[in-house]
Each structure stands twice: as structure tokens, then as C-alpha cells.
Amino acid sequence: MIRLLRGSISRIMRYSGAGEFSRRYAVMNAFDGVVTILGIVLGSTLLGEASAGNVVAAGVGALIAMAISGVSGTYMAERAEQERRIRELEEAMLTRLDNSIIAEARKRAAVFSAIVDALAALLAGLVPLSPYFAVLSGLLNLHLAFYISLGLSLSFLFTLGLFLGRIARSNLIISGLKSLAIGAATILLITLLNLFL
Amino acid sequence: MSKRPSLSRLVLDVLKPHIPDLIEFCRSLSEVEGVKKVSAVVVEVDAETDTVKITVEGRDIDFEALKERVRELGGAIHSVDEVVFE
């Protein structure tokens, strides 16, 4: 069953080029998920006195919204792109490709990309949110959770940077630091905002 | 009692997209009923498509199934260039 699933996924990838797109969506949305939660955690802690429950509620709310927007947006965009490719291929072939495995794989690829997109945002966002779940279940105090959450966000961003560096076959550390800089910029901006408000 | 001759060799002129590649294309054709051997030669490579000459050998080859399989793979049989009943 698992082998069958893996076989069909790898076939979808090969026939549609979705592997590359899915990877792009996954990284992009993992970034989105982490930075959004970073923003919520920072904003609610620095700008106001939020309880762990508040942070979790806001975070989970944002992640659900992101997952839904990810699924629907990616599905529609990707479906359109894939259909355009099928039409282009049909023009080159001078035939219809309606029931071919290519058309089938490309249609499934849109669904696959959409799922990857949503899951990436959701799972990546849950990482920096997890310390606040721990607070809710009484394992951590709020103060500590804030720092652990920041640490998790930044290390997750760094890891994403490493991953991107590996894809680009460029210097891993520089790529990791670049992506870390995005997190740092977020922290800086929100902290500055805190000074003025 | 002698068996009647059956379709044993076909040479097809096929237009196919780059993907699935020729290996996968021929592997899939080799799974069709009656096919024992598939060989293919690329005749021309275009921006989106390949023109290939595919030779199919076997016993009692199911041509309809073969045609259907080519279509499923996104290809089109442009002509049947050689037929052998044996």
C-alpha cells in the first residue's frame, strides 16, 4: 500500500514536474508559517501582556487560515498552470491528452502541491508555537516559553536556509544565515514598534 | 492442426511527449497482451515532442490495446509502417 502510494507520487512528480514546485511551495510556506508565529509570539509578548492561551488561540487561528488559504490558493494557481502545460503539449502533439497519464498526473500534481503547501505552513508554524502548548499543559512558564519559541523559530529558519543552500548547491552557512537574517529583521522591526507604541 | 498466423511484428511511427521518457514508454508497451519484445529508435527530437520508430514483436499482439496504451501515455500513432503475421 505504502509502496503503491510512493510509486504513484513519484510518477506524479516525474510526469508533471511537480517535485520542484512542491519543494518551492513547501519552503515558501514553511517560511510563512514560522515568521507568522514569530510575529504573533513577539507582538503579543512585547506589545501586550498575552497569556499562553491567547498566543495559542491567535497562533492556531492564523495557522488554520494559512492552511486554508494555502490549499485553495495553491490548488487554483497550480491547476491553471498545469492545465496550460497540458494545452501546450496538446498543441505540439496535435491530439487530445484527456485520458492520458500525463493529464492525470498533472491534475493530481495540483492537489499534491496544495496539500504540501498547507501542511508545510501548518507544521512549520506549530514548531515555534509548541512551547506555548507546553505552558498550557503546565510544563513550562510563560517567560521561558517565549525564549524557547524564539529559539525554535530562528533555528527553524536557519535550517530552512540550509535546505535552500543545499538545493542551490551554494554555501550552506551563508544561505542559513541569510534566512536567519529574515527572522532577525522580524524581531528587530517588532521590537522597534514596541519602542514607539 | 496448424494454428492460424497471428500478428507478430509491428513497426509504428509514434509521436510522443518528452515525458514519459522512451524507456518508460517502451516498458509500458511491453506489458500489453501478446508483446514479447519492444525496441525503439528516436527519429527526431522537437521542442515538446519526440518522433520515435517503435518495433513491437510477440505473438498475437493485441493492436487495439497497444493503440490505447500509446494514447494513455500521451502519444499518437502516426502510421503503421510494417506488419508481419506469422
Image (tube, rainbow, N blue to C red):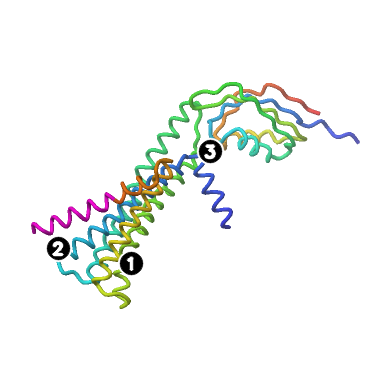
Amino acid type at image mark 3: Ser
Residue holding disc 2: A47
Query: Which is more N-terminal, label 3 or label 2?
Result: 2
Query: Which is more N-terminal, label 2 or label 1?
Result: 2
Give the label on residue A130, or none.
1
* Direction from residue A76 to residue B81 in the image, left or right: right
* Direction from residue A181 to residue A159 in the image, left or right: right
Q: How far apart are marks 1 and 2 (CA)?
A: 21 Å
Residue furthest to the bottom: A138
What residue range appears in magenta? A181-197
Instruction: Give the image location of residue A134, x and y in percent.
Output: 32, 72
In magenta segment, residue B25: no
Query: Which is more N-terminal, label 1 or label 3?
Result: 3
Residue holding disc 3: A100
Same chain shared by disc 3 and disc 1: yes
Residue placed most toward the observer, A176 or B47: A176
Instruction: Give the image location of residue A153, x and y in percent.
Output: 31, 58
